[in-house]
Amino acid sequence: MKKKTLIFPLLGAVLVCFLLTACTEPSPLYGIWSDNLGNTFSFFEDDTFNAKITVAGGIKTSYEGSYSVLMNALTLSCSNVELRVVTEWDIRGNMLYLNWTNEDGVPLSMTLYKISN
């Protein structure tokens, strides 16, 4: 009788450990990020994004596509224009830091604030 009373709690503990390790942690990028210049990034759970980037003269360009994250490297592959941006990223509090390079190779250092999940 003692063997059965030890097996069930042990089996339950193993099952709980398996369930906790099987759950994936959501990316801190998910949500909508914006700055005071009109730049906006939206990152979605299905690894897609859309962005509106304001360049000199106030001209806004829209981008959309997929993204991937490997440690602190962010790769943005645009599907509406031929552009692939690889940048380091960092989140401190509710601020996202990244560098964007447009189609002409012009870099733009951004500090974006999380405005929505």
Image (tube, rainbow, N blue to C red):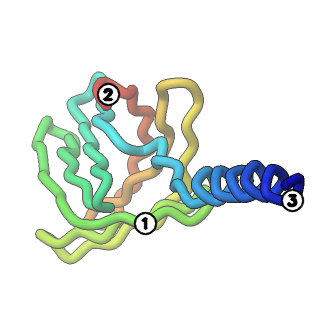
> Can you identify the residue that label 2 sits on?
35
Q: Position of residue 93 (x, y in %)?
A: 56, 25
Q: Secondary structure at mark 1?
A: strand
Amino acid type, callout 1: Ser
Q: Of the numbered discs in the image, which one, if any, rests on residue 68?
A: 1
Work out whether residue 112 or residue 105 is closer to the camera in this orientation and state it: 112
Select label 3 or label 2 by which is in front: 3
Select label 1 or label 2 by which is in front: 1
Mark 3 or mark 2: name the one nearer the start of the chain: 3
Work out whether residue 51 or residue 116 is closer to the camera in this orientation and state it: 116
Select label 3 or label 1 by which is in front: 3
Residue at the outermost right position: 2
Q: Of the numbered discs in the image, which one, if any, rests on residue 3?
A: 3
Residue at 12% across, 69% down: 80
For disc 2, the neighbor class at 10 Å (few under 14, some 14 to 19, many from 20) is: some
Q: Secondary structure at mark 2?
A: loop
Residue at 42% across, 44% down: 29
Q: Position of residue 89 (x, y in %)?
A: 53, 49
Q: Quadrant of residue 64?
A: bottom left
Work out whether residue 101 or residue 104 is closer to the camera in this orientation and state it: 101
Q: Position of residue 8 (x, y in %)?
A: 73, 54
